[in-house]
Every structure is written in C-alpha cells, then in structure tokens.
Amino acid sequence: MSFSSDEVNFLVYRYLQESGFLHSSYVFGIESHISQSNINGALVPPAALLTILQKGLLYTEVEWSVGEDGEVARPIEGLSLIDAVMPEVKPPKPVVKTEPGKPGVDSTAPAATNANSNVKAEIKVEPGTGNAGATKSSSSTTGTTTPTESTNEVDSSGSAAATANNAGSGASNGNGTQAATAGSTNATAPAAGDSSATAASGANKKANSSEPGSSTAANNAGNANATSTDDAASSTSTNGNSNTSSSAEQPSSGAAPAGAAVSTSNPDTAAAAGGATAAGAKTSTAAVTIRVGAQPNNVTAGTATAQSSAPSGTISSSTGGTPAPVEAMEIDQSIEIPESKARVLRGHESEVFICAWNPSRDLLASGSGDSTARIWDMSDANTNSNQLVLRHCIQKGGAEVPSNKDVTSLDWNCDGSLLATGSYDGYARIWKTDGRLASTLGQHKGPIFALKWNKSGNYILSAGVDKTTIIWDASTGQCTQQFAFHSAPALDVDWQTNQAFASCSTDQRIHVCRLGVNEPIKTFRGHTNEVNAIKWCPQGQLLASCSDDMTLKIWSMNRDRCCHDLQAHSKEIYTIKWSPTGPGTNNPNTNLILASASFDSTVRLWDVERGSCIHTLTKHTEPVYSVAFSPDGKHLASGSFDKCVHIWSTQTGQLVHSYKGTGGIFEVCWNSKGTKVGASASDGSVFVLDLRKF
C-alpha cells in the first residue's frame, strides 16, 4: 500500500469544492500545486474522500471490536473520526477468561455481532452536483421535452457543425445514469491564479472569490454587531417597520442574533452546530450532504458556530426577537402550471447558471458549467426548439481547445443583435445571433463574475476575481479602461448611465466610477460583509445593494450615508431587482418597488420611498437565487433550489402560478412581451413556461 501527498491533496481539494468551500479550495489548490499533479480529475468519483474515510472508519470499528482470540467480543458502534485518531479513546482489549484447554469468553461481553452491520453514513449529492450511488433516469423530466432538437455547434473559432441531439437524454453515461461531475464535465484542476470551475461557481460567484485576507463569515463573526458610522443618521427598517436609530443603538444584521432559531438547509440535513469555526462542519454525522452550489453560512454573533442554510418552519428575525412562523408551504394545485405549458430544453451537460431573453425576438440564451452557452429559438413557429451551441475555447499549443470552465454571465445588447458572455476562463466573448464569434475580450486575470452592456450598446462592463472592473469597446473588443479600486474580488456591476457605473466587492465597498476618471467619483461604505449584488433604479438616482450581512441598503449620489437600511431577512441576501415602473419607464403610473431574494427562502417586496416591506413571499423551501419582474411590473417570478418557479402578484403578494422542475433553479427571466418565463437549473435543464391563456 502506498499513496502520495499529491493524491491526498487532490482528494482534500475535491472535498472542499464539493462541500461548497470554494474560496478555501481555490487557495488550497494554489498552495498545494494541484494544477501540476498528473491526476485525471475526471476519473475521480464524487465524494471520494468521504468514501475512503467511511471505509477506514468501518475498518477501525472492526479492529477495535475484535478480541485477541479473533472473536467479536466487544462491538464498537458509532465511532467518530476524532475518536478513531485519538489513542486514548481506544478501548482496552477485552479480557478473555479461559479454562485450560478450552477457549472461553468474558461473561460480561455482549453477544457477538457482525461489526459490518453498522450502517454507513448516507451520502446525499444534491441535483447537479454529481451522483453518489443513486442513479437518475434521463427521462425523468417534468413538462414537455422536445423530442429531437437540431443542434448547431459553434466553437470560439467560429466554425459550426450540425449534430443531432436527443433532447430527452441529458448527459448520461453508458449505464444510463446521469454522469456525475463536481463542477464541469471534465473536472480539471485550476492553474495558478485561476479560480476553479465548479458547479457552485455560478450559483454563488462570491464563494469562489475570497482570497487570503479577504472578508469571510468567520472574520465578521466578532464584529457583526458593529455598524459603520456612515449609517449613523440612516433610516433603518426592521421587519418592515421603519424607525430612526444611530449606529451605536442599531446592530447590523451581519449575524444571526443569539437565541434565534437555527434552521437547516434541507429537511434531510441536520445543522452542524457547535463547530469551532465558521467554515467548519456543514454536515451532520447522520447524513453527509454535498452541495456543489452556494451553501450559505450564518454566524451567531460572538461565536464561530456555523449553521446551515435553509428554512424550516420558522424564520429567525435578523435583529432578534421571537422567530415568526412561516406560512405553510402547500401549493394549490389549481395554480400549478400544466406540463402542456412547459417546454423542457435538454442539451447542456452540466449545471445551467444563467439565462436571458433576447429583447427583440423569442431567443433564450443560457450559460452552463459545460463551457458552452446556447441560444434556443423559442418562437411559436419553431416547435423543435433549435439550439445553437457556443463553445468557449482557448488557444493551447497553437490549437483551439475547450476551456472546460463555467459560463456564468451573459447579456444581450439593447437591440438583441449581439450576445456577450463571461467565463471562468477569464475571457469575455461577443457572439452574433447566428452563433458566430465576433470578438474575444482578454484582459482579466481570472474568472469573470458579471458582465453588462450599456444602454447605447457601445460598451461592455465586466467584473472579475482579479479585483478589477473593465469597460470594453464593443466594436473593437479592446479594453477602454480598467478600474482597480477594490481590494478584493469584484462581484457585480451595473451601469448608471452610458459612461458611469457602480461596482461591489467582497471588500464590503461600493464604488461609483466614470469612464475617463481615474478614481471613484463616489464610494459607499456601510455593509459589514460581502456585497453580493447592486442595481440602479430605472431613473438611475437610487442604488440598491444586498449583502451577506443580511441587509438591503439604498444609496443616493447626494448622500454619503445610505438612505435606507432595510433589515428583515434572516439570512444572506443573494440578489435584488427593481420593478420596471415609475417615472421614466413604460409603466409611469405604477409605484416603484424593489424585490430581494434571500437564503432564508423568502422573497420580500419593498416600498423604497417609505423604507417598508410591502409583502413577504414565503412559499419557497430552499434558498432563493433569482427574481425577475414582468415587463408591466404586475408579476414577479422567483426561482429557488427547491426546484420551483413561482409567479406572484406584486399588488397582492399572492402566488398565482407555480411550476416544479427537475433541478434547483439558478435563474429566472421574462421575455419582452411578458408571456413567457425562462429558467435554468442545476441538473442541466432549461425550461420555458408559457403563461398565455392563464
């Protein structure tokens, strides 16, 4: 028996990836030179480290149970890993009393049992994260799966090839079971300076963005109650009730309060409370749940105890108090969207992190961990759902080879003639609607987390792990200006005007920058943890931001402090969206509202003018990753890792339509007519819901 340190390091690296510790795996991969090992990661099955640890633990239980005579004299059950490596815990060998010439057994020893009868800890691999033991039929889809799709494959060199693709098959191996990978189809170790491409990278881009010294939940555990003095005179809303408080009196919701209810991320997963580190045990001893997707941590103020991430029957108030009961999660069957109104699109071979409708035509673009983007023709005249496959390739040895990195951001320009994509290979690309590659934009030193066109369509804005944001000239593909003001990876960007934009980062700062200006024109401080998303209101006057500190803040260029500090969510807020309503929009007579989606499994609608919560939408049972308003602002779509897409009335807060897919939902979006909702999921599926005639 022999093994090398490279093999041990690789298994630890993969365990960190599969468990959601993506920034830790990135740093570990760099320091242990994973990229220089000769291990083929594609051949290593998911949960490999846990599997070998289980076998070793069972062997230790057997070894300790067997007496000197070889009989099972004292069975050892429920042995923990820590017990197994501590010599002082090992029980003494049972004393065997024998009569001359006769083998004997200690009368105090229990009856012999088979040590192998111990049940192994169950390993659960969530949708899209790989398949550990359980097979998944490729035909188990919900909705109408298109029977045969015409597929045109286009790589980064612009060459196209027509192939026939079985839409219902998904990505399967020779045994008919869905292929399991931890992140991408070809699991390759990242090169130095490049973040690993994993399934969770798109679900929670910030998880892969932390660098040594950057802010983490653990770093903020001790100061979670400290609010920046910039917020001293800001309006604070707690659970929808506005009041004014100084920063010394109003704690930030960067940590769950003492005594708040601890909920688990899954009914099958027990909370790993009592750990000594915030990045510590996210799994229970009874069941090991591997989520290659964002797995948020909440840290109780003053401790480093981690708690898992999903709702149970109650939601803890982010500012203390008695947990409020959540509405029952039953869905009225009368509002379920029938299968005849759902078109399931198969073709991607890994998680689909992002999707977006063309603003002019019924073309749906999607980006996946299989290093491709796809353009689906969803027009009524096309019943076969033709797809263009945009393969993201890189130059290697003078040849074009697949990048094997996630495509996690994409955006159409204003007239729908061009599609921009951002990838974890560090390149942004511009594609034409026929699938041809127009430009490759290479300046970032690592994964790209966000990418946006400006309204005029002449510039593209991107944010990356290299702590910079870049404005690109869309016509030439050249870098017009690079902004290096953040001290940690930049997570999101949003245009205010055609030449000014805001960016946010894991450094807890928000910078407003302008083309041609070499320093930020405004910097907003006040968040106490990573800032996940920022969005300008339709008028470009107010900027909304959401953070892992569980707060939603509203900023104005006329003030240094936030206008509103909205504290009602009990876990991290992942994304926010403004309604397309109010002055200057196509719906000027409808009030402007803001939607926030959280890992506490709720969506909240806010009256920004009053700083109060209008509605709390509570039907989801897992973290909510995406929300999107219909073009008229009357409805809101939400997507969660509970596999459900819900359609809500923004006026009443009532659930009006619901559909359950086959994987956790990463993104939802409306077409320009407001008749269809697209969604992308963790199992590689994309589906379109037709809401006409409802």
Image: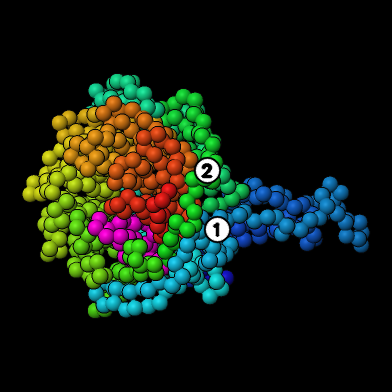
Residue behind mark 2: 331
Residue that appears at 39% across and 39% down:
649
Q: Which mark is residue 50?
A: 1
Residue that appears at 14% across and 53% down:
456
Q: Is residue 622 left or right of residue 114?
A: left
What's under tag 2, amino acid-wise? Ile
What's the magenta region?
A: 347-375
Q: Quadrant of residue 374?
A: bottom left
x and y percentages locating residue 130 in the rendered image: 49, 62
x and y percentages locating residue 306 in the rendered image: 47, 40
Q: Compare residues 629 and 347 and report the one nearer the observer.
A: 629
Residue that appears at 21% across and 29% down:
561
Mark 2, other Cα within 10 Å: few <14 / some 14–19 / many ≥20: some
Above or below 651: residue 643: below
Instruction: Let me know if residue 603 appears in the view.
Output: yes
Mark 1, other Cα within 10 Å: few <14 / some 14–19 / many ≥20: some
Q: Compare residues 264 and 67 and report the one nearer the observer.
A: 264
Q: Quadrant of the N terminus?
A: bottom right
Q: Compare residues 168 and 136 and report the one nearer the observer.
A: 168
x and y percentages locating residue 687 in the rendered image: 41, 58
Q: Quadrant of residue 176?
A: bottom right
x and y percentages locating residue 660 in the rendered image: 49, 52
Q: Which mark is residue 612?
A: none
Above or below 581: residue 46: below
Whether 268 is among the magenta residues is: no
Residue that appears at 44% across and 42% down:
656
Q: CA distance from mark 2 to mark 1?
A: 37 Å
Above or below 62: residue 299: above
Above or below 170: residue 500: above
Among the two numbered marks 2 and 1 on one chain, the one whose residue lies closer to the N terminus:
1
